[in-house]
Amino acid sequence: MKISKYDWNALFVTRTVASWLVAFIVFFPLLFLMVTAFKTELQAIAVPSLWVFEPTLENFTEVQERSDYMRFAMNSLITSVVSTILGLIIAVPSAYSFAFSPTIQTKNIMVWMLSTKFMPAVGALLPVYLLFQWVGLLDSQIALIIVFTMSNLPIMVWMLYSNFKDIPHEILEASRMDGASLWEEFRHVLLPLAMGGMASTGLLCLVLSWNEAFWALNLTSANAGTLAVLVASYSSPEGLFWAKLSAASLMAIGPIIVFGWFSQKQLVQGLTFGAVK
Amino acid sequence: MSFLELQKVEKYYGDHHAIKGIDLNIEPGEFIVFVGPSGCGKSTLLRMIAGLEVINKGKLILDGVDITETPSSKRDLAMVFQSYALYPHMTVEDNMSFALRLAKVDQGKIDKLVKEAADKLDLTQYLKRKPGALSGGQRQRVAIGRAIVRHPKIFLFDEPLSNLDAALRGQTRVEIAQLHRDLGATTIYVTHDQVEAMTLADRVVVLRDGIIEQVGTPLELYDKPANRFVAQFIGMPQMNIVPAALLQNVPAGSSFAGIRPEHLSISDDSRLTGKVVLVESLGNETLIHLNLGDQSPDPLIIRSYQRTTLKLGDTVGVNWSDDIVHYFDNDGKVLHLA
């Protein structure tokens, strides 16, 4: 059956409108958040919602005054960066051995590692909480770094594994024949070839750690709390402060959105590794 | 004492006994070719010499030193891989100088060695390119260049020509032979292609199922095969094997007789007759396939250097001289006749 030009146009218009609609629905909560952050508390709870008003910055100054935004931001930065670096230090050698010297058990170990992500985090909350309590690490950056590293490790190992798998084994063997020690092999051959995969693995884990809320909320508060804790503190028993909550949320997600915007190409490449050749 | 000695070398992959006790001595400057059907262990054996596979039993002695447990990086051997295995992120120059840079050779000397190798291999104009921008043949030459700049103790080649097209393969084969004559370096070369084995080797090692079937010069293998396997593996088309019962005056104990196709001739004074089932005219030679009937399952192939007027279905007689017949016992071992 021949499709006329008219049908093609109609199809194109329908598809465009549908795409924009879906995009708008997905984006709407973020838009709502951004708009609310610039309202007064009174405007924020108005029904129906106000879309035209005089924007104010008072929520942002109050968030900074009331709860020291910078300290939470620093906690987020330190815990996510350190856990990512630590994770890479552990995951790179693991993935290397899985990818280049596999044994009969390699597949099983890797599936087991991934299976730890099947369990809901809350299932391990009590023992983890008690352990950190016993060693006196509650509300510390160290506790979060440990938990973030451990929970990201399976994903990191898997991503790096599939990345390394794309590198022909013979190239590494060639470097060994050329006299390269293990470190030289890593430094001069594996690292340059796997740089893209390692970078995207690191980026993803940075984002995951930055956004992590469950463990941050349960293991930390005023001292080592991350931005997730800061945001949650605005939905407290004293009542909901929508405008300030929105401002705090915007300040919490701002850095990572900017960061993600600049690194999105790298991220997409890492996540679709193996899918596109 | 030999330059490289393999002493009862064995390899297991789990339960699979891949290499079953290999003894081999290689002299300095020799060009040794490992040949055999796929799965015979020839590549595994090469990789064990390279240090890329662990040796489970036995010893490997290089120049008087036991290197059985020495890591690849310390063996001072160079290898050319089937896939070339060039470093894709480095230029041709960097690929070739990588080993020298690791060994902290003086930069002036590196430049000189790389230039020499590049000249020899016709790569000078490509030195600044990356491997991705080269043709298959050029990549192959870079892989060889990477090996020769180092002046290693032994060159190892793992089926280096199998990724090239037929014309380039022939040309590169000649170049490798030339290179070996120029450098005089000890070389071990793995291939499944018997033409490469016959043309390149000083000595050929024929492997099957992890054991050595025979070691010898190419013509020794062709003229005096130790067993039925070697007899049929070397030579194209392969040696005709017929049940000994079909012939007269066979020596005691022989079960099969082997005659190479070029040693058979069509004759009225015939000792065997058969029906023509296929005629392959190749121009310089003609291969005539005869069906011997129920007694022999495989057709008998005659290589004739004259053109023929024979047609399918014709019945013809064949003859040969007795001194070129190989007799094998029931186990396939050749019978040595007094």
Image: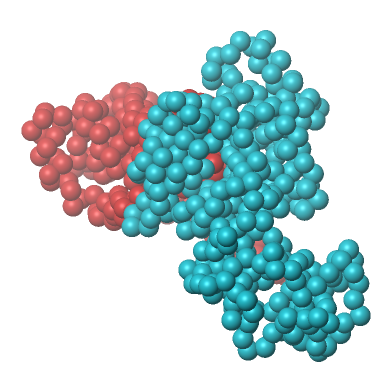
Chain colours: A red, B cyan
Examine the rendering and report whether any part of residue A178 can be seen.
Answer: no
Against B297, residue B97 (above or below) is: above
Who's the residue at 69% across and 64% down the image? Answer: B323
* Image height of B176 relative to A57, above or below: below
Residue furthest toward the left? A134
| A75 with respect to B265 (left or right) | left
Q: Position of residue B167 (x, y in %)?
A: 81, 50
* Residue occupying image coordinates x 21% and y 32%: A143
**Residue B188 visible in the picture:** yes
The x, y position of residue B318, in whole percent, is: 77, 78
Residue projecting furthest to the front: B338
Q: Nearer the viewer, residue A140 or B14?
A: B14
Q: Is residue B192 above or below residue B282?
A: above
The front one of B196 and A64 is: B196
| Quarter residue B128 falls in | top right
Residue B308 found in image quarter = bottom right
The quarter of the rendered structure image containing the N terminus of chain A is bottom right
- The x, y position of residue B268, in whole percent, is 84, 82
- List x then y, in percent, for residue B317: 79, 82
Depth check: give the residue in front, B80 or A210.
B80
Q: Is residue A173 left or right of residue A83?
A: right
The answer to which of A251 and B215 lies nearer the viewer is B215
Residue sitting at x 69%, y 18%: B113
In the displayed structure image, the side of residue A264 where residue B321 appears, left or right: right
At a point 69% along the width and 27% down the height, the residue shown is: B183
Residue A62, quarter of the rendered image: top left
| Side of A29 where A215 appears, left or right | left
Query: Vertical placement of B98 versus A215: above or below?
Result: above
Instruction: Count numbered badges in the picture.
Output: 0
